[in-house]
Image (cartoon, helix red, strand yellow):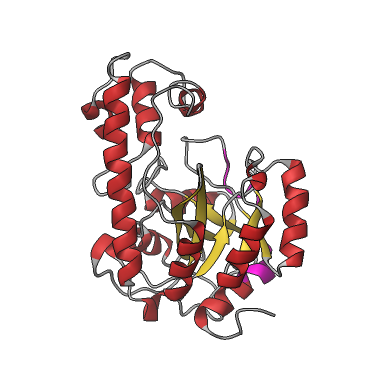
Amino acid sequence: MSGPIDLPGASGPHGAIDRSDAIDLRGAIDLRGAIDLHTHSSVSDGTESPAELVRAAIAAGLGTVALTDHDSTAGWQEAFDAASGTGLTVIPGMELSTNYGPASVHMLAYLFDPLNGAIIAETQRIRDGRLHRAERIVERIGKDYDLTWDDVLAQSTDGGTLGRPHIADALVAKGHVTDRSAAFQSILHWRSGYYEKYYAPSPLEGVSMIVAAGGVPVLAHPATLGRYRVIEEKAIAQLADAGLFGLEIHHRDNTEDGKVRLYELAEKYHLVVTGSSDYHGVGKPNRLGENTTAPEVLERIVAVATGTRPFRG
């Protein structure tokens, strides 16, 4: 049987779905099409609504897509509704922000309970931190460039997770840079003097929280520009002990040397290997399905989340 997850309705904050309905996926996954487990909608920093993202995934020939907006589940219901009857399977997920020393480390969370109190409280704290940090960044940039907070709000959606990508879009709209990439390479670069960190839990706290909410955590693009040197092996070992299930190795931003090292770590610590696009619409050059996940890996993720097999083995 193929098709989207059958979710009867939304309730709670951020359009959350009761997990008892959300993860009954056994026998419901279409494994004939490609599987892309990392995408973003306008709920966070993508440029397409969840429904538009679903239509783009169908047009790209995907069989399964995971919606993993930053620190929010608000797009889930719209994505489920848009996929209903199309044959596309939507995996509910999120990209949880965490901080490891000076580095920002992201944790993909699949099939967790969106009504989990700890998840709700922590993601609200993260989003609030992102918002106030963005306001301070814009205030500093505005001293040197024609940019106001209203310019940034014009690039965001109501209820979405507002962050630096929206500042980048505002800089583009004002003609200060050509595109998002140029903004992050110049005005929004951490060396520019405008950068500021925001609150986020540690990766270990993130993994523990996701597992406690019944979800499956995968470390997102951990070898980006040498980032695998920041996430040391001892940290990977600790995360694996806490319940880390996989590493997102097939991703355009991972370095080739980093991928080799990540494969070694995945084998040593019995972690699955995933691949995905990290699609943001026109916000990034990443294209849907440019990297994908093997069907057997998705089967294992679903089996763990639905309790049909042990976490390891």
| Spot occupied by residue 260 in the image (x, y as percentages of width and height) | 78, 50
Please name the residue shown 34% across and 72% down the image: 116
Q: Nearer the viewer, residue 30 or 252?
A: 252
Please name the residue shown 73% across and 49% down the image: 259
Q: Locate residue 136: give its quadrant.
A: top left
- Answer whether residue 86 is visible to the viewer in this image: no
- Answer whether residue 106 is visible to the viewer in this image: yes
Please report the bounds of the magenta region as a residue range.
286-298
| Spot occupied by residue 218 in the image (x, y as percentages of width and height) | 57, 61
Dominant SS in magenta:
loop
Q: How many marks?
A: 0
Q: Nearer the viewer, residue 3 or 283?
A: 283
| Spot occupied by residue 153 in the image (x, y as percentages of width and height) | 25, 34
Please name the residue shown 76% across and 51% down the image: 261
Left or right of 250 on screen, residue 174: left
Q: Is residue 299 above or below residue 310?
A: above
Q: Is residue 279 above or below residue 306?
A: above
| Spot occupied by residue 51 in the image (x, y as percentages of width and height) | 38, 53
Point out the image quarter for the N terminus.
bottom right
Q: Locate residue 253: give its quadrant.
A: top right
Q: Is residue 221 above or below residue 108?
A: above
Q: Is residue 178 above or below residue 79?
A: above
Q: Nearer the viewer, residue 299 or 87?
A: 299
Point out the image quarter for the C terminus.
bottom right
Please name the residue shown 46% across and 63% down the image: 205
Does the magenta segment cover residue 289? yes
